[in-house]
Amino acid sequence: MTQENKKYFNQILGGEPTNHNVLYYKSIDWDRVEDAIDKSTWEKLTSQFWLDTRIPVSNDRDDWRILTDEERDVVNKAFAGLTALDTLQSEEGANVMRDAVRTQHEEAVLNNILFMESVHAKSYSTIFISLNTTREIDEIFDWANNNEYLQYKARRINEIYQNGTSLQQKIASVFLETYLFYSGFYAPLWYLGNNKLENVAEIIKLIIRDESVHGTYLGYKFQLGYNQLSTDEQNELKDWMYALLFDLMENEEKYTEEIYTQVGWTKEVNTFVHYNANKALQNLGFEPFYPDGTAENVNPIVMNGISTDSSNHDFFSQVGNSYLMGESEAMGDDDYDF
């Protein structure tokens, strides 16, 4: 599909008038896949499909009641920040990368990512509704809409989505998926390791499982384009990337300080953020940058929680991050014997 035809197709989807003519619409053919990573990523994402409504967050109300006011404030603000960033990613992130897709199958994967980011954003509302009053929820969103550090990183990423090159957009998206989300993930993973808010944490682990695939896939697509650049172009883009990393990190450390100081976790959360910033760089094909950002330096309780391995859950009480979608089989004549 040419870029001209691609632009026309996007205009049609957006309801824009056009008098451009195309010869035909090319049907997607999953039997002929140009990039095997597209197919394997699609299969991975669809096989781990989930919905927040299948996890009984309300079962965590007893744990929620025994948390201190400061602890509840930390969790609420962490999730408010995640809601804002997932909303950005669902509305702009995957969408702006459509014009630079290499294959039709890549666009299909982006469609999946786009939808699941909306599921993530909606999941935080499920948590809020299950644990907070309407007035408290309004206060949470008011905080998110007006917090200078949260709004700064959202604006910074969106500026790149709107005005950056396709490779800059991929860098911003990988930073968001693999790095900027994780300051918000720290609290629920810590409580999971201390046997509290287990259903809330299961939603977070499901989200982390998705984000790990998103970040790896987008990083791979970035590397394909980056490797086609000249040495000078690579160096220029690398300098731009590190400038963005440092700018976002300076803001992120202020953000974590504002949220986590009241429970004394700021230093260890920043170490966790450094760890995930290193992971983002590795997804993009670069070496880790932050010396303290190693698994050994992260709180082991949180590192254990970040694992997306199967959880041992009673099927009838709650659904863990390894739950299986029901399998179906073809109907036969016997199914119609009543």
Image: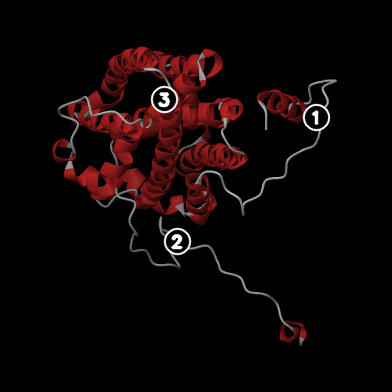
Tell me if 58 is positioned left or right of 7 in this view: left
Q: Which residue is tagged 2?
A: 323
- Location of the N terminus (image quadrant): top right
User: Residue 228: x, y in percent?
Assistant: 44, 25
How far is disc 1 from disc 2 in space, using C-alphas? 44 Å
Residue 285 location, x and y as percent?
32, 31
Q: Quick check: marks 2 and 3 in contact, CB under 8 Å?
A: no
Q: Nearer the viewer, residue 277 or 189?
A: 277
Residue identified by numbered label 1: 22
Q: Residue at x 72, y 27 (%)?
A: 5
Do the numbered discs 3 and 1 sit on residues whose CB atoms are within 8 Å? no
> What is the x, y in percent for residue 94?
55, 31
Q: Position of residue 258 (x, y in %)?
A: 29, 20
Estimate the spatial distance between the alpha carbons at disc 2 and disc 3, rounded to whole Å.
37 Å
Quick one: 300 or 258, which is closer to the camera? 300
Please state which of residues 146 and 296 is positioned toward the viewer in this rendering: 296
> Residue sitting at 29 percent across and 28 percent down?
286
> Is residue 338 in sight in this rendering?
no
Q: Is residue 125 above or below residue 154?
A: below
**Residue 108 appears in the picture as rendered:** yes
Q: Which residue is under mark 3?
A: 226
Residue 19, by quadrant, is top right
- For the C terminus, the quadrant is bottom right
Query: How far is mark 3 from mark 1, CA to CA?
Result: 31 Å
Q: Give the answer, above or below, for where 244 lies relative to 13.
A: above
